[in-house]
Image (cartoon, helix red, strand yellow):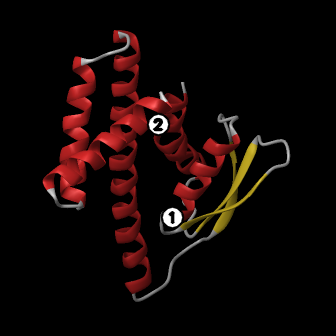
Amino acid sequence: MVTRLLLNIVLALVWCLLQNEISLRQFLIGSVVATAAMLFFPRSFHQERLYMHKVNLGIQLAAFFFKELLIANVTVVKQVLAPELKIQSGIIAYPLALKDDFLITLLANMITLTPGTLSVEVSPDRKLLFIHFLNVKDIEEDRRLIRDGFERYLQRIAQ
């Protein structure tokens, strides 16, 4: 799986060099061309499908993250610009379904990068993630949003 990703990156960079332009646009075009080329020379069909599935999930995770980032930015701006500050901040304990340290770190970083939230600590047994929320309205709803959003995508990518 990792070798396929590295091969895709190398082929995309070769594409940039052949186009005599190193830019994000050319890199993305090269990635699409490299992916198409790898489909014509598969080691096994199952590995190719799995690779493409993981790439698709990664793109979905990035899109979901940017959507949540935009929503959180708008929400925080509304709260800050409101004439009367009506927030109820707090720290909640979020039960982790992820077991891998890298995935837990990735989840904590995505939560921290989203305005209005901050990952504070992971419990020593790695079962709880403590998250500070700028405005806690419904604890169960906040937990559900993380579980059905970030954590669900990370679990699907890790499988």
Which of 99 and 84 lies nearest the eye of the viewer? 99
State yes or no: discs 2 and 1 in contact (Cβ < 8 Å).
no
Q: Residue at x 41, y 64 (%)?
A: 72
Relative placement, left or right, of 141 versus 94 is left
Coordinates of residue 55 in the picture (x, y in percent): 36, 34
Q: Which residue is mark 2?
A: 153
Badge 2 density bin: few <14, some 14–19, many ≥20, Cα 10 Å: some
For residue 57, above or below residue 82: above
Q: Look at the numbered disc 2 and give the secondary structure of its residue.
A: helix
Relative placement, left or right, of 37 versus 47 is left
Q: Residue at x 39, y 11 (%)?
A: 46
Rendered-image quadrant of the C terminus: top right
Q: Which residue is mark 1?
A: 113
Q: Report the residue that reaches farthest toward the right.
A: 124
Q: Look at the numbered disc 1 and give the secondary structure of its residue.
A: helix
Q: Quadrant of residue 20?
A: bottom left
Q: Residue at x 74, y 46 (%)?
A: 128
Coordinates of residue 82 in the picture (x, y in percent): 39, 84
Q: Residue at x 35, y 43 (%)?
A: 10
Coordinates of residue 60 in the picture (x, y in percent): 34, 40
Whether residue 59 can be seen here: no
Which of 155 and 9 lies nearest the eye of the viewer? 9
Q: Report the residue that reaches farthest toward the left.
A: 19
Cα distance, mark 2 to mark 1?
17 Å
Looking at the rendered structure, the kind of residue marked 2 is: Tyr
